């Protein structure tokens, strides 16, 4: 779809700006800590989906230097930054919609704010694909912005670049996880202050494979 191409081109273009703004943001650290605790203190194999400039992977590696991290993103410029920021990680370009093709099993998968760039159907597919490549008792971390699907649409940055933003229903995501045989998920809500000063509630979900 046209809006997908434009959204990906925008992510690629603003990679350095995103790095500047979000590389050291600590707002979500408690939820990353909860992910680390749920995976447990072991030599885990971890996949990051939509890694951006590698901010989340860098935090995970700082907490758990023994983890083996694979970090993926659809935007090549994001991957170049993620690899620079995480020399020990294996970073490569991959569309989240292709993740089911990976022939590796993971102990944990973290997808920070990727669902906002996937449709409801693509998000369901992503969760199903994650289930396929997670080990027994594996942990899935997802974050998104809750809201009505019909409010989804283009958001325009100060430089005029546009990104198509998809809101998701928490109930739908939880039901998808339950249908796919995850345990009842843990839900966190974090208030995020946008550039215009408005507050947006961000939802983070941690779910374990049964
Ligand atoms: C909001 S950033 C999140 C970066 C990082 N995970 C974080 O939480 O700060 C969204 C990232 O998702 C990537 N992305 C968007 N659509 C994607 C797709 N279909 N497959 C993989 N990555 C995608 C973008 O390129 C961007 O780097």
Image (tube, helix red, strand yellow):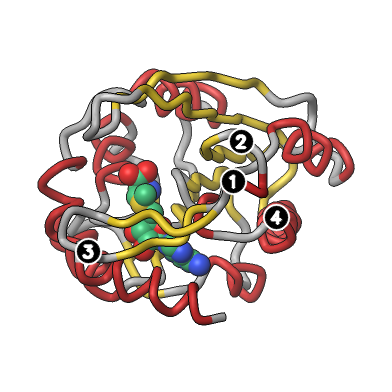
Cα separation, mark 4 vs mark 2, equals: 12 Å
Alpha carbon of mark 3 to alpha carbon of mark 4: how far? 26 Å
Gap in Å between the C-alphas at discs 3 and 1?
20 Å
Mark 2 sits on what residue? 147
**Closer to us: mark 3 or mark 4?**
3
- Residue occupying the point 41% across, 22% down: 33
Mark pair 1, 2: CA separation? 7 Å
Residue annotated with mark 1: 151
Name the foreground residue: 189 vs 48: 189
* Mark 4 or mark 2, earlier in chain: 4
Q: Is residue 126 above or below residue 210?
A: below
Mark pair 4, 1: CA separation = 13 Å
Q: Nearer the viewer, mark 4 or mark 2?
A: 2
Horizontal side, residue 27 vs residue 174: left or right: left
Q: Is residue 69 visible?
A: no
Residue, x 46% and y 61% (percent of image)? 164
> Does mark 1's beta carbon lie closer than 8 Å to ligand 1?
no
Please tell me which residue is depicted at 45% across the width and 44% down the height of the picture: 112
- Do the numbered discs 1 and 2 sit on residues whose CB atoms are within 8 Å? yes
Pointer 4 residue: 120
Q: Is residue 67 left or right of residue 131?
A: left
Label 3, ligand 1: CB separation under 8 Å:
no
Q: Is residue 101 above or below residue 33?
A: below
Determine whether label 4 and label 2 are within 8 Å by CB: no
Q: Nearer the viewer, residue 201 or 36?
A: 201
Q: Name the mark nearer the viewer: 3 or 2.
A: 3
Q: Within the image, what quadrant is residue 191 found in?
A: top left
Per the image, label 4 sits on a secondary structure element best described as helix
Q: Which residue is mark 3?
A: 160
Disc assigned to residue 112: none
């Amino acid at each position: 779809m046209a809006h997908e191409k434009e959204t990906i081109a925008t992510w690629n273009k603003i990679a350095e700006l995103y790095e500047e703004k979000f590389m050291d943001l600590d707002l979500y650290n408690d939820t990353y800590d909860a992910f680390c605790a749920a995976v447990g203190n072991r030599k885990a194999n971890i996949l990051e989906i939509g890694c951006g400039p590698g901010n989340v992977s860098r935090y995970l590696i700082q907490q758990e230097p023994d983890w083996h991290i694979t970090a993926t993103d659809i935007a090549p410029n994001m991957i170049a930054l993620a690899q620079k920021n995480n020399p020990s990680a294996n970073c490569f370009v991959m569309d989240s919609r292709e993740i089911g093709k990976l022939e590796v099993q993971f102990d944990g998968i973290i997808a920070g704010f990727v669902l906002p760039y996937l449709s409801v159907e693509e998000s369901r597919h992503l969760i199903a694909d994650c289930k396929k490549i997670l080990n027994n008792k594996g942990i899935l971390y997802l974050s998104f912005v809750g809201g009505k699907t019909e409010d989804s649409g283009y958001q325009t940055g100060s430089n005029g670049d546009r990104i198509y933003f998809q809101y998701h229903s928490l109930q739908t995501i939880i039901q998808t996880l339950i249908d796919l045989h995850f345990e009842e998920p843990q839900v966190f809500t974090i208030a995020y202050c946008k550039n215009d000063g408005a507050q947006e509630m961000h939802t983070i979900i941690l779910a374990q494979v049964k």
